[in-house]
Amino acid sequence: MIENNCENNGENNGDSNNISKNNISKNNCDDNSDSTNIRVGVYVCHCGGNISDVICVKKVAEGLANYPNVAISKEYVFMCSDAGQKLIIEDITSGKINRVVVAACSPALHELTFRKALQRAGLNPFLYEHVNIREQASWVHKKEPEAATQKAILLTRAGIEKIRRQEGLENIRVGANKHAIVIGGGPAGMRSAISLADRGLQVSLVESGNKLGGRLLEIDTVYPTNEKAEDILETLKTDIRARKNIGVYLNNEIANISGFVGNFQATLKNGETIAAGAVVMATGNKSYEPFEGEFGYRTQDNVVTMPEFHGILCNIRNNTSTNKDFIHNGKHIQSIAFIHCVGSRQQAETHQPQADGKLNEYCSRICCSTTLQAVNEVKKHFPNVKVFDVYRDIRTYARFTEDGLYEKASKNGTLFFRYTEEQLPTVQGKNITVKDVLTWNEEVTFEAELIVLATGIVPNNITNIVEKLKLPIGADRFLSEAHPKLRPVEVANTGVYLAGTCQAPMDLVESCVGAAAASSKAAIVLGKDHIELDPYVAFVKPEKCDGCQKCLPECSYVGAIFMNKDGKAEVNPALCKGCGACVAVCPQRALDLKGWSLEQIEAMVDAIAEA
Amino acid sequence: MANPPKILLLTTIASSYTGANTVGQAREQYSPNTYIIRVPDPVMFPENFYLRCFQKGIDGIIIMSSGSDCPYEGAYARLSGRVARVYKLMKEKSIPIHKLKLTTICTVCKHPFLKEISDMQAAIAKEKLA
């Protein structure tokens, strides 16, 4: 263990008592105006042997002991352990240090652990820097221990340089309106509204149509349980009616929406205004609309889309006199063909682009299971009808569908043909021609009286809300989450959450699970009287700002940066997302990011480059 | 022996920094002359930041952005525009443009991550030979 306590160091002897007093009584937030008052504690972790088996941690600690502003440099077997954290806490409370750098694993694992340790010691938790020398050094440079050690020293120096320039930060606190707006009254929206209401929040459920249900209204039965869609819908509606804290707005849309987490203001088309703390986007999807002539759609009356087929099935089943006979447009249908991947997995060579010039390159995920469900329903209720399934790949991925639906269809007499992306099937009247992979690319032509296109899904048009709230849209036109694994129902705009198929193609179960997750996230945020936001937002140094306004067009978030009455730029921390786009264009360097200032990053680069 | 070239990897908290961790978790090996800095988004860097890095002795910079999946509205388009302007400035100052590369690395992009490093190493080595 190496210590270079600045209290015993000639440079700082004179004021060590004052420093110690400041540390404890003033939370050490404001004592970095004089760099000699900055005393950094560096702690290098062995991580058992995960780091120390490759990197010489003793050498790292020794190499940093005399670095400017480093008061203590130690190595320890497990810094994240109680004993490791105690080392830091004791050094802080004894006044030896007022900044902390831990060189250890990824910050994703223990940055928060150490920030909390600082907090327990009475130090501002943001006076902490985490240096990753495990995932990004010892684990990836196993065969070069000396070079890995030198790299660890440089990375830790960079961390020291950053923390030397760090001021204590406070989380941003904004009030929380305990009211949520759920936009979209499909199953995801209904599920969200119920979950939010159960957590004690007032909910406004806004639906553009004249009834709740969304695309569930179009469906006959759902896979894999074969439940009637209308029964599921009735259960959801009953649950909504039973909750007095859910207000339903039918035939209504969001005309305007603005604000930030805790304080959104929405105006409906009927002029009514709603103030809410969170917004759940459950705007759903619609079925892909084939082009005229695409597989004979609209040019032949025997070609229908999957939603249209569901309507036909419902009508037949509601008409008991035609039991066992599949009658459509007055004709007895003896054969039906289903064509998969219509409007999904498109590629330039074989598909026509959409109106916006893009192709639907994504898999719509639900069509294979929906198609096989329909195939099995036909064979169950109309066993004499011949069924052909023309597919590219079978992707019945959900639980109980992977084997159940496909196997059932295979055993009930459905005839499968497989095409490739290079050669799509063609439709001419009743004739379908497929170059069939299953028979070694033999060209097969067969007749089907009714042709059903397994149409994919596309997101509903929500341009108005997207523009108003500046929501991120992916290349596939669906709303884009902040992170598919780490923040799957959030967007960069805090307080806005994604539920269901506005985000990506998903089935009913996934939509409802996503909706429950989104409402849980919203309920957590609105669960307290105040919302604490990360302090990493842009800020202006007014003395440097010359009012050039170059920052304004650079910001994508309405109201996040504006000119104040003194003609200087000013940031609304609740609206700023902390991307830093404005920082780059300020010629005076009057704008910067809290916790990630340009000066800090430049100093890190210098520490790496100049060594 | 001459010091190995230094390659700076500018990574995003949302994507590529986690991607670098994924590479580590998989124990994939790459050269230790690579230094990762995490930032919310590299769109925060003005054009002269990159020139300054080269001036200070950094031999190559790989900007590992979140690409079109960037959680910040419009940030990737702005970043691309900015990097295009940096290339122009680099040409004016006779700095080889292969020393700077804008890429997109996601949280699980192990092989693209390794390939970008390998490509940058090769480009710098070629330049040194020339």
Image (cartoon, coloured by chain):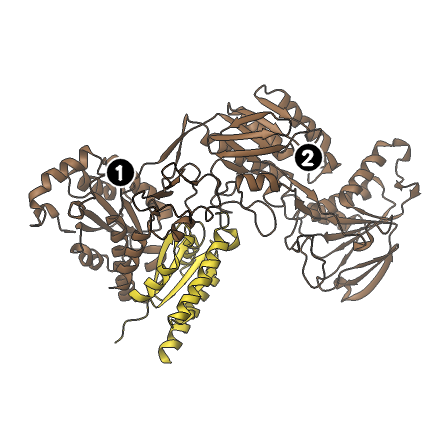
Chain colours: A brown, B yellow
Residue A271 spot, x, y in % from top left: 61, 26
Mark 2 belongs to chain: A
Q: Is residue A499 left or right of residue B115?
A: right
Which residue was labeled with disc 1?
A: A124
Residue located 46% across and 33% down the image: A261
Whether residue A142 is visible: no
Seen from the viewer's position, the closer of residues A380 and A518 is A518
Residue located 53% across and 39% down the image: A469
Residue A339 spot, x, y in % from top left: 77, 53
Query: What is the residue that sits farthest to the bottom in this orientation?
Result: B130
Mark 1 falls on what kind of element? loop
Looking at the rendered structure, the kind of residue marked 1 is Asn
Mark 1 belongs to chain: A
Location of residue A150 with respect to A550 vertically, above or below: below
**Badge 2: residue crowd in 10 Å (few <14, some 14–19, many ≥20):** many
**Badge 1: residue crowd in 10 Å (few <14, some 14–19, many ≥20):** many
In the image, which disc is placed on residue A214? 2
Q: Marks 2/1: CA distance? A: 49 Å
